[in-house]
Amino acid sequence: MPAATPTSGEGPLGTAIAFARALMGNDAISATAYFGAGARLLTADGTEVSGPDAIRGVLDQLTSPSQSLEIRPGRTLVAGSVALCSQSWRLLSAGNTAASYERASKATFVLQRRERRWQILTAAPWG
């Protein structure tokens, strides 16, 4: 069952943190619920995806049991009903094999307050 989506009282930072917690908890379904209608996400190779099914597909890859994702909140800039949030991401593969990897990035999100809640409009997890 998806987690409750934050209301505007929690603000854009609360939404960004709740989104990060869902991802770190390997819950792509709940993480997808933080995206608004018409949202866009840029993949690691710069491909733009839109719509809940495509976004969830990307988030499913990030929440794979073969890797772990560490996310730290960054800065949040609010201008009325729009906000820009940053986070530090670190993706680690599980195990100590030759195929192990680590990827770090500064993720950027644009959120908008719609109908009393903050929603992610654009996400660029890999910068």
Image (tube, helix red, strand yellow):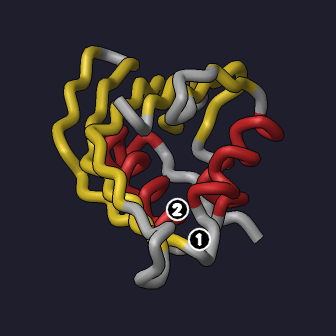
State the residue in front, 101 or 63.
101
Whether residue 114 sits left or right of residue 38 in the image: it is left
Is residue 101 among what the camera can see?
A: yes
Q: Position of residue 122 (x, y in %)?
A: 51, 24
* Among the 4 quarters of the image, the one containing residue 27: bottom right
Q: Which residue is mark 2?
A: 23
Q: Residue at x 69, y 25 (%)?
A: 49
Amino acid type, mark 2: Leu
Q: Which residue is mark 1?
A: 26
Is residue 116 among what the camera can see?
A: no
Q: Are marks 1 and 2 in contact (CB under 8 Å)?
A: yes
Query: What count of labels does the image hold?
Result: 2
State the residue in front, 22 or 47.
47
Amino acid type, mark 1: Asn
Q: Position of residue 33 (x, y in %)?
A: 67, 48
Which quarter shows the N terminus?
Answer: bottom right
Q: Position of residue 44 (x, y in %)?
A: 50, 35
Whether residue 107 sits left or right of residue 73 in the image: it is right
* Among the 4 quarters of the image, the one containing residue 48: top right
Whether residue 4 sits left or right of residue 96 in the image: it is right
Q: Position of residue 89 (x, y in %)?
A: 32, 52
State the residue in front, 48 or 1.
48
